[in-house]
Image (tube, rainbow, N blue to C red):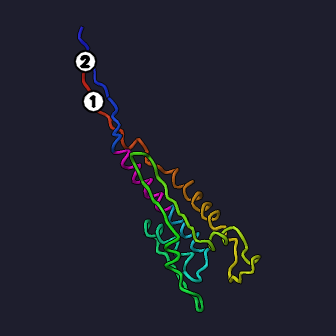
């Protein structure tokens, strides 16, 4: 007795799925950094331009239009000081599945104003701290990512079937 059969065999295109996932995560990370920056930009005041200038490296990496501002009338121009005291990384590494960005500042008065009301040391500031920009920006980033990452590419779009005949 001879039997004939046709089977439908599923095939999953892992490489195409990885590419789609990489594109989605890269875009989500860029948008998350953009939202992080826009939150920080709204909090940090412009005076000499130094504090906002520390954000320039990250802003240029994600295409955020940063208005450094400053100096306001009577303030020294310290934009170059801020540029020297800010750094950033932006990484979308598909092979290591690592997606991250970082911002670092070593600008002393921005660090002080992030955590303290500097008027206690007899500084005369128009907008004294504490700014808490990191906390506010992290909340904005987490809020965005909590909804954005619910919409990852479906694996169904990368599954096809193939008919195999036997006998």
Dot 1 corresponds to which residue?
163
Above or below, 108 against 123 in this view is above
Within 10 Å of the Cα at label 1, are there few (<14), some (14-19), or many (20+) other Cα atoms? Answer: few
Residue found at the very far bottom of the displayed protein: 74
Dot 2 corresponds to which residue?
4
Question: How much space separates mark 1 and mark 2, taking CA atoms?
Answer: 13 Å
Q: Quadrant of residue 15?
A: top left
Magenta span of residues: 16-31
Residue sitting nearer the eye, 117 or 18 = 117
Residue sitting nearer the eye, 123 or 130 = 123
| Residue 104 at x, y percent in the picture | 54, 64
* Residue found 69% across the figure and 74% down from its top: 129
Above or below, 122 against 150 in this view is below
* Residue found 59% across the figure and 83% down from its top: 47
Q: Is residue 75 left or right of residue 4?
A: right
Could you tell me which secondary element the residue under label 1 belongs to? Answer: strand
């Amino acid at each position: 007795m001879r039997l004939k059969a046709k089977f439908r065999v599923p095939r999953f295109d892992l490489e195409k799925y990885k590419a789609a996932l990489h594109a989605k995560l890269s875009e989500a990370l860029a948008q998350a950094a953009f939202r992080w920056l826009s939150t920080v930009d709204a909090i940090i005041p412009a005076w000499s331009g130094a504090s906002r200038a520390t954000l320039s490296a990250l802003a240029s990496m994600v295409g955020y239009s940063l208005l450094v501002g400053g100096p306001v009338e009577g303030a020294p121009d310290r934009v170059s000081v801020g540029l020297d005291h800010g750094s950033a990384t932006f990484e979308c590494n598909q092979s290591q599945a690592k997606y991250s960005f970082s911002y670092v500042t070593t600008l002393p008065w921005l660090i002080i104003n992030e955590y303290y009301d500097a008027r206690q040391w007899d500084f005369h500031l128009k907008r004294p701290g504490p700014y808490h920009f990191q906390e506010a920006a992290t909340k904005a980033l987490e809020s965005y990512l909590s909804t954005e990452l619910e919409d990852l590419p479906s694996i169904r779009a990368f599954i096809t079937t193939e008919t195999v005949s036997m006998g």
